[in-house]
Amino acid sequence: MCGYGEKIPMESVAVRRHPATSGQAENRRSDGIRRGVCISGSGRASRLEKGKLTVRITGRITARSVVPVVAAGLLGVAGPAYADHTTDIRVYNRMDGSRLAVTGNSTAEGARVIGLRSPSLQYTTARWSVDERPDGYTVFRNELANKCLQPGTDNPVAGDPLVIRTCDGSKLQDWSRRAEETFADSPTGWGTFRPRLNSGLAITIATWEGGGSWDSLYLDADQNSTDRLWRLARGNNTWW
């Protein structure tokens, strides 16, 4: 059972709106990150109904983050540019504990994104803002550079590096998250990050560089391996 206020990524939320004069249903699924949502185990599906809006959710959750979504749907209010915005985020790799940053602490257009391993490298580019789109995709904005994480090419393929570029709202800067798969089918907080334009790939550690003080990164096949698993933490906290 999750404790109150524990932040665990939600992997699947389906919102079903029933038209007033038709039996057809419109479904939306979100594989992004839901901040402030708590899921415990693989609990049974639950349903919240209000008027003609039905929300189907897998797992047990707290209502704090669902209520605004339900209310917006009932009122017919258009969503903001970002459904959620969180600052001061660190992105850690499971294999070696490296944290996502920019090479040389650079803020330049097209600068390479790396993983910092050495405690002596206290780059300020290791801080990110996480913006979630209404459709569930996530944008990583580097706080120092004010630029967004994206693949190094316009058509992402295996072997592409990761870079930061001016945030432009394009799908190239959208990422989805796949939770780590376990035999117990319970959330661990770790997951892979996949580019929207090629969800078969994931951010992966390539090689140790600089005498092992940092990692080069690239896109490779999305697999359940530690070099591809990442988690988020806020500030100096051990969890988001």
Image (cartoon, rainbow, N blue to C red):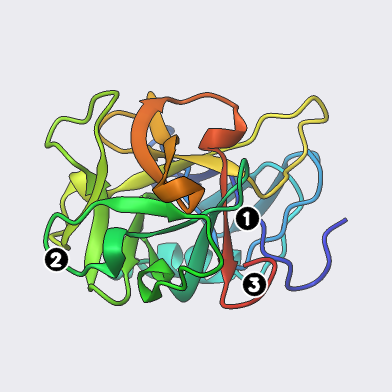
First in sequence, mark 2 or 3: give its number. 3
From the top left corner, tell me how far across and down residue 89 is, in percent: 49, 70
Residue corresponding to mark 3:
64
Please name the residue that numbered disc 2 is placed on.
Answer: 108
Query: Which residue is found at the position 29% from the left and 48% from the top?
Result: 174
Q: Quadrant of residue 3?
A: bottom right
Is residue 131 visible in the rendered image? The answer is yes
> Marks 3/1: CA distance?
16 Å
Disc 2 and disc 3 in contact, CB within 8 angstroms: no
Instruction: Judge from the rendering whether residue 226 lies leftward or rightward of residue 21; answer left or right.
Output: right
Nearer the N terminus, badge 3 or badge 1? 1
**What amino acid does circle 1 point to?**
Glu
- Which residue is found at the position 68% from the left and 41% from the top? 58
- Residue name at image x 60 percent, y 28 percent: 225
The residue at the far right in this view is: 1
Q: Residues within 10 Å of mark 1 (few under 14, many from 20)?
A: few
Left or right: 5 as drawn, with respect to 1: left
The residue beneath circle 1 is 49
Up/down of 133 relative to 18, above or below:
below
